[in-house]
Structures are given as structure tokens and as C-alpha cells.
């Protein structure tokens, strides 16, 4: 794309200035429109070193009220800590909220193109990254984001003379690194790499805009015009539904809830104590091993109210070194969370390599409570099965072990436990009116849960049903599954 | 995608039947909704031979009023004549009108996968086809089409037993060809080829649906459910704007109209006659040569009213063998044309290999008259620059020579010619009130034309300006350009 890039005729200096001023005024008006329309805007600046991204950025934000935007400067090597997360993580945690702009001064493109140049990424790894990037950009747009991507383009000669100018002044020489000169020396090679990346990620949902960046006010005018145009389209398209996508991941067959037998899923007290001791010892050792092997682990709990999730998690964590795990109880989202992609709060809580994150309720709220209570549109939750599979696939690709538990009880058992809670003073905090209301919707929930289990039990992140009429049985089963999964992962990591 | 394909749990026979009936009823209701919403629907059936596409198709259309759908059976080798057009041509001429369904019993997928299997398509050629297909599917969706793609999937064993069953009965044995058995024998190889194609074309705008086709009523239920779901989304999204895309093709610099000198672009009568004779002789020979070399040629004329397009075309065709060219005067579209993608009427008029199609006005109406008269939305005409470049790129890829003329006069010359027409009885038919109205909008047109010339003068299909204050000068220049372009094409075709 870059070799063929034909610059449009550049207007006169006078006209360029006027256009910048006019577009800045338009952007200032637009920030209120997007606030009202609740559109989150992600603006990505990529391009050659010294192409003037910073200068243009400062002119673009000049039009904006500081309450309405953030700048995420990603133009540096990921820190050691950031490298312990999936590669998209450091960008995704910076996602804008609705009605807000986030300007990314370089984003996920740079990590990929640098990897190609250094041969750290081979063809296969590159393809995977491209898939991940196209997937997340599509997800963002499907979830109402405006994603605008600009590539700042200058010639080899222009870049060289800018680098020389920067290097020759004391006040700016610190801004020029060897890496910058290296890019200039290998300009043609980079040109191919950049072109390839632009081509591979130039999708309808989030197309690329190449900016002729030789003249700065002209570059600014172009960027502003595209942003204002994009905002018009995004506001016009507010409420757009995405065509439903069929699952593309291998699925495991799952039984329907009604076909899961809860009979005979019991364990004697003595047997339970003995097993628990043995399994804990084993799990403690494995926790050490996954730490040494730097394997991240996600354990996700979903289940009926009063199914025994809390007690199950407690038995799990009792075996773990507290420095190596965290439990996240998931309630309804905070305002800052609600204003972003619904998976954002889970991206933010991902475990580092070697750590375990345990979720007491999860991202599956989208296809259960949010679906049934109408907190999202039908298109939203229909789309979510695939989006969640993509999310978990991304985690597994990054080496994460993902274990998902459905804690199952029958309706009578729930009633008995609710009644017990109600009648036992020290348990009363555990039962609310909402629990009783949810119980009334048991059948609707059962249908939603069945669909969830059918559609999201991928081979790489399958659901495990914990039969929990006897809580002890469920606890032993959970421990065994976690141990089995961690053993497998440790073996494969060797 | 196919190897990993996980079948969803199949409902009972009773339930399958009920779902088919319910969905058929829903589709019957939906045909009226799409009629009203003016959505054109393209439904593509692909898949294994003997997977039951025909059976399902007949059950799907049972719900529909015959006035609302067509079936395009493309499941055969392209005819000799069809092979003389760009490979998408035979499918695109079958495009549905708004409010209509067209069911494609196999579409552009099959030609590509068969080519891969037989090694007629190498990697490069395959990539080009994929680009063309993704481009046209996106264009259709951007222009309001609902495009739904189904792949009918059965196992190798199932296919074998179906083929055997068909072959063993006298009444059905004609339906089984050697090609079908060949696909079964090479099932695994085809599985890879199909998976690859599905993956490469599984875009947001038109995703794939893989149909578990072992049971026919279950396959029917699935297809109907997806179609009804797709219709809901398409109606919901009616009026959606596409994000504007930046041009990705190499452009030639074009002057602004006001900078084009019309002075000294004259030729003396004697000189004109002599030249005309020579050029015609040369063009006549070249017309033979492009016929022998099977090169298709498109010559497109745009220009101001009274600029002299008609006379210019007449001088061009005077040199041509009437069996080898056609002139298409383009006025406002017929109802059947207006109800389809705006390029459809031009796809239909493309030249066969070895033939010349001359367009007196063209697809550029979209960014001139349709833009200025409000016959399409701003998003429509903004998008059209890129769509038109893609269209012409497709033609050039298929070996077509594309020559585009802008016939230029100044405002005074137009006035003189209008007045002359008005005052000369035998020329009065050439001048209408509309011409005068258009003349009042000269400045708006000039701006639109400048943008058009800047944005669509690709290196592979550049604009040529014919200075036509002196019509003879313009005619000679046109002939010279056509000769030069045909000579180049003949040379390259060697």
C-alpha cells in the first residue's frame, strides 16, 4: 500500500491553515456529540519515526476539552511486567470509555512490525498476531467503538533529514535513538513490512488512513478531516447490529442441564477429609511449578445461587500460596466498566505469568444475567458467545490455562439452602430478595445456561460441571480437575 | 474451519419438523418486510457434492412467493462465452434487485476451490481471487445487500453412501458424475482447500455459516434460522453508513480543470483529414489484432454537455468493424437497474474478450449527477471513488484495457454551442431544459469533476483529458490515445 501511495494535491499554505482551524472547530463541536451519543473513540497513530506524530497529536488535542481524552504513549518497549500478559493486554487496558477519546501514540502495529523485522516473529506467529488484531478491532467496532488508524508516511530522505536536524540540536538530540537511524537505513525493508501489515489489517470495520506527513499542517488537516468524518459515520451508525457469526472453534459436546445426574455424586466425610489433604498437597506443589514455569492460570466459577461456589473456592485457595493468586468476586460493573467493552474489566484482571486468577462469577454474565435482565441487546448477547470464545482463545494462545466450572444443583436443593440461610442468623447476609427473584426465573436461566454451555465449551477452554448437591463432592472434583489441568500444562511447558 | 467444526446438538425429529415449519412461516412474513425495506438478498449455497443443497433449497423457497425470488444455478462449468468475461461476471449479472432473493446454487467459491485442487490457480492467482471476492462481497454489503453464505458439510463416509445410493437408482444415476466421486476420493485434500477458502473469506460483512447437513430437515431448519436472523439484522441496519476508505491504488497526478489550457489545442481542416485517415487505418488493424489476441477493451466518455462526446465517438467507431464493438449511451437507470448495485448495469454491459465497449457517459454518474442531484447519500458517493477504482481494477486484472476520456470545453464554448443548437432546427433535439439547468450548476460540477479526476485516475485506468473547444483536435487526440493503449496491450499480450 505504501509504495503505491499517491499523495493528493496539497492545498496552499494559507488554505492548509484555514482547514486546520475549521476542522479543529468541528472537532470541538463533535466531542459533545460523541459524549451525548456515548461513542468511545480509539485513535491510533502509527508511522515512521520522526514523521511528526507527536506534533500532529498536540494540534489535534488542542481542540479538545481535557476531560474528554487521554493519550496513551506506547511507543516504548513493553516493560518486564507487561511482557507477562497477552501481547494485546497493555493496549487494551487503555481502552477509552464511551464519550471519550484515547489517542494511542503507536499501538499494536509497532510490536508486530518490529517483530517481523527482527525475525522474532516467524510467518506462523505473525499470522496469529494478525488474526488477534483483526479480531479485537472487529470486536471493538461491533461493541460500538470508533477505531481510526493513521499511518504517518514520509520518504527515506525526509526521515533522514529530520533525524539529522533533531540530532544536531542539544535540546532535541535525546529524542533520536539508534533504533530511529536503523529504521532509516533499512527503510526499504521496513516499507515492505509496513505495507504488508497495512494490507493485512485494512478491514472494513477499521480501515487505514495513510497520512502524507511531509508538511505538518497538511498532515494535521488530513487527520482532523478523517476523524471528523469518522465521527459523523459513527454517530449515524449508532445502534448498528453486527451480522451474527457462527462459531469457528472446535467445541466439546456438553450435556443439557436436565440430563446431568446429581444422584450418587456424594462423598463420605472421612473419605472427603483424606482426599482433601492429599489433593491440597499436590496442588501446593503444582502452584510452585506453574510459578517456576511461568504459566498463567484462570479459574472461572459460574453456578446457581447457593450452589456452593464460595466454599468451593475457599477449599481451592486454602492450598495456594497467597502471593501467587487472586480471587475476583464479580458483581455488576462499575460505571467506568460499564462505559467500556464488556470484557475490559476482565482484561484488566488477567493473571500475570505464573499467577492464578480465580473469578467468582465471570464474563459469562453477558449471556446470563445481562441477557435475561435486558442489560444488553439481543444482538449483543448473541454476538457474545463468539466474542467470549475469541477472548479465551487469545488467553490460551498466550499460554494461559483456562478452567471453567459450572456448579450445578437442582431446584429443590437451592430451596433448602435458601431456607436454611434465611433461618440461620449468621447466614442471612448471604440471601437477598434478588436471589428469590432469580429463582423465579429458573427455567429461563436454565435455557440460557444450556445455550452457554453448548456454545462456549471449546476444546481449548471446556466447561466442567461440578455436581454440587453434595458440596464436598464438588470440591473434590474441582481440585482434581485443576490438578489434572495444571499437570498437563506443566508437562507441555517442559 | 471444517476440521474443527463442532456440530450443535441435534433436536429430536419431531422438534426439527416443528422448527422448519415455524421458520418457513417466519420467512414468509419476512419476504414482505424486506420488500418494504427494499433490501436485496443474496443467498449462497456451497458445500460438498451430494450434501443436499438442492433439497434444502426447495424447502426454503417453499415458503416464498415466486415473485420474490430467483434461483441461479451456477453448479456447472462456465460456458465458453462466460469464460470471456472477468470471473465474477457470470455471478454478478444474476444479482437480486431490492426486495428480492437470489439463491445461488454454488457461487464464486466453487470456481476458486476447483482451481486450487487442479493447480490451475497458483498461490498468487488464488490470492487475487480472494481479494476480488472479499472486495465484491464488501461492496455489496456496503450498498445495502444482505449476503448470506452457507457451506453444507457432510463426512466422507456420508458422502460416499449418498453417491452410491444415487448411482444405484436408474432415476437418479445421471446426477452422479465422476467429478463427484473424485471429490469423495480426495475428501481430505478438499477439506483443506475448503477450510482455507472459508477462513480467507470469513469477513464481518458476510460471514460463513457451516451447516451440519447429515440430516436434511435439521439442515433446513438451520439454514432457515440463519436467514431469518440475517434478515432481522439487515432490516435493523437499513441506512447504515460504511466508514470511508482511503484509496489503496496508485494514482496519477491530474491537473485541476481550471489549469487545463484550451488555447492552441486546434488543428487545421486539411491536417485533420489527413491524420484522421491514417489513424483510422491504424485503428482498424489494431481492432483486428485485439480480436485475435482476445483482449477486451472499455472506452469510457465523460464530459460537459455539448463538449462533443457524440461526434468523438462517431469518429472512433467509423474505424471499427461493427461486429466487434458496441456503443452504450448511458441515461438515468431503468427501474430494474436502480434496484440493484449501481455498477450492475455496467457489469452487464462489459465487453467479451476481443470486443470493444464504448460508454457514452458511465459509472462516474455516481460521483457527478447522482451526487449533485441527491440521488444517492453522501456516504454513497464518498464510497464510490474507491468502489469504482476496485471495479476498474477488477477489469484490468482480467486483461481489459480501460481508457477513460474527460471531454473538456470552457463555459463560453458551451454557451455558444447551446445557442447554436437552440437556433438550428435540426439540432434542437440535442438541447433540453435540463442542459440549461445543469449549466447553472457549472461550479458545483467543476468541483465534483475535479475530485473525481483526482481520486480515480489510477495508473492502471488513468483519465485522459480531451481538449475539445476544437472538436477536431479532441477527435485526433482520442484516436491517438486509443491507438497507443491498444498497441501497448497487444505488445504485452504477446
Image (cartoon, coloured by chain):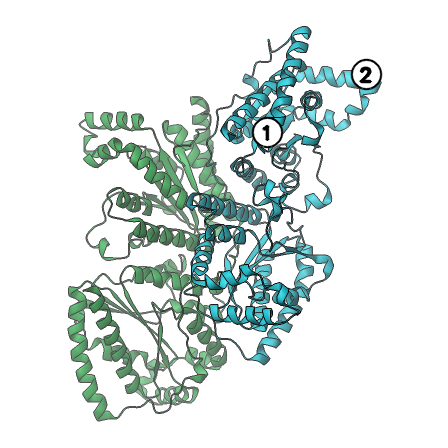
Chain colours: A green, B cyan
Residue B145, compared with residue B175, is above or below; it is above
Instruction: Look at 32% across and 40% down and name the residue there.
Output: A193
**How dense is the environment of label 2, judged by Cα within 10 Å: few (below 14), some, or many (20 and up)?**
few
Nearest to N terminus: mark 2 or mark 1: 1
Which mark identifies residue B355? none
> Horizontally, is B118 left or right of B467 in the view?
left
- Which residue: 22% across, 57% down? A84
Corner quadrant of residue B224: bottom right
Q: Position of residue A63 (x, y in %)?
A: 40, 37
Count of numbered badges drawn on the protein: 2
Write down the chain letter for disc 2.
Answer: B
Q: Secondary structure at mark 1?
A: helix
Report which residue position mark 1 lands on.
Answer: B290
Q: Position of residue A209 (x, y in %)?
A: 42, 38
- Residue A37 picture location, percent across and down: 49, 51
Quadrant location, the N terminus of chain A: top left
Q: Position of residue B428 (x, y in %)?
A: 81, 22
Numbered circle sitting on residue B423: 2
Amino acid at each position: 500500500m505504501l509504495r503505491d501511495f499517491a499523495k493528493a494535491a496539497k492545498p496552499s499554505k494559507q488554505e492548509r491553515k484555514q482547514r486546520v482551524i475549521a476542522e479543529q472547530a468541528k472537532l470541538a463541536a463533535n466531542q459533545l456529540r460523541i459524549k451525548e451519543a456515548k461513542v468511545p473513540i480509539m485513535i491510533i497513530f502509527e508511522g515512521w519515526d520522526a514523521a511528526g506524530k507527536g506534533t500532529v497529536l498536540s494540534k489535534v488535542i488542542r481542540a479538545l476539552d481535557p476531560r474528554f481524552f487521554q493519550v496513551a504513549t506506547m511507543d516504548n518497549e513493553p516493560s518486564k511486567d507487561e511482557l507477562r500478559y497477552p501481547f494485546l493486554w497493555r493496549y487494551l487496558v487503555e481502552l477509552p470509555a464511551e464519550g471519550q477519546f484515547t489517542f494511542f501514540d503507536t499501538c499494536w502495529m509497532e510490536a508486530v512490525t518490529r517483530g517481523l523485522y527482527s525475525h522474532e516473529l516467524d510467518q506462523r506467529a505473525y499470522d496469529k498476531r494478525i488474526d488477534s488484531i483483526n479480531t479485537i478491532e472487529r470486536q471493538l467496532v461491533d461493541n460500538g467503538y470508533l477505531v481510526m488508524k493513521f499511518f504517518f508516511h514520509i520518504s527515506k530522505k525526509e526521515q533522514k533529514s529530520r533525524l539529522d536536524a533533531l540530532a544536531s540540536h542539544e535540546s532535541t538530540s535525546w529524542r533520536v535513538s539508534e533504533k530511529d537511524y536503523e529504521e532509516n537505513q533499512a527503510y526499504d525493508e521496513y516499507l515492505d513490512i509496513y505495507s504488508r501489515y497495512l494490507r493485512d489489517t485494512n478491514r472494513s470495520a477499521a480501515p487505514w488512513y495513510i497520512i502524507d506527513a511531509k508538511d505538518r499542517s497538511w498532515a494535521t488537516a488530513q487527520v482532523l478531516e478523517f476523524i471528523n468524518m469518522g465521527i459523523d459515520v459513527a454517530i449515524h451508525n449508532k445502534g448498528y447490529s453486527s451480522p451474527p457469526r457462527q462459531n469457528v472453534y472446535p467445541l466439546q459436546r456438553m450435556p443439557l442441564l436436565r440430563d446431568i445426574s446429581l444422584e450418587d455424586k456424594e462423598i463420605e466425610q472421612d473419605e472427603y477429609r483424606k482426599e482433601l489433604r492429599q489433593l491440597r498437597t499436590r496442588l501446593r506443589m503444582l502452584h510452585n511449578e506453574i510459578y517456576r514455569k511461568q504459566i498463567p492460570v484462570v479459574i472461572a466459577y459460574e453456578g446457581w445461587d447457593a450452589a456452593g461456589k464460595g466454599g468451593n473456592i475457599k477449599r481451592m485457595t486454602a492450598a495456594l500460596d497467597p502471593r501467587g493468586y487472586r480471587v475476583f468476586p464479580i458483581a455488576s460493573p462499575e460505571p467506568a466498566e460499564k462505559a467500556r467493552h464488556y470484557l475490559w474489566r476482565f482484561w484488566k484482571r488477567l493473571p500475570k505469568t505464573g499467577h492464578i486468577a480465580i473469578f467468582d462469577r465471570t464474563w459469562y454474565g453477558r449471556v446470563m444475567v445481562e441477557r435475561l435482565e435486558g442489560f444488553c441487546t439481543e444482538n449483543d448477547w448473541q454476538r457474545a458467545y463468539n466474542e467470549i470464545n475469541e477472548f479465551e482463545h487469545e488467553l490460551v494462545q498466550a499460554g494461559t490455562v483456562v478452567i471453567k466450572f459450572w456448579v450445578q444443583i437442582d431446584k429443590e436443593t437451592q430451596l433448602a439452602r435458601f431456607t436454611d440461610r434465611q433461618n440461620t442468623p449468621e447466614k442471612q447476609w448471604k440471601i437477598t430478595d434478588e436471589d428469590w427473584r432469580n429463582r423465579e426465573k429458573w427455567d429461563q436461566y436454565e435455557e440460557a445456561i444450556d445455550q452457554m454451555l453448548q456454545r462456549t465449551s471449546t476444546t481449548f477452554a471446556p466447561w466442567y460441571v461440578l455436581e454440587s448437591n453434595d458440596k464436598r463432592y464438588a470440591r473434590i472434583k474441582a481440585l482434581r480437575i485443576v490438578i489434572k489441568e495444571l499437570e498437563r500444562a506443566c508437562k507441555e511447558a517442559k
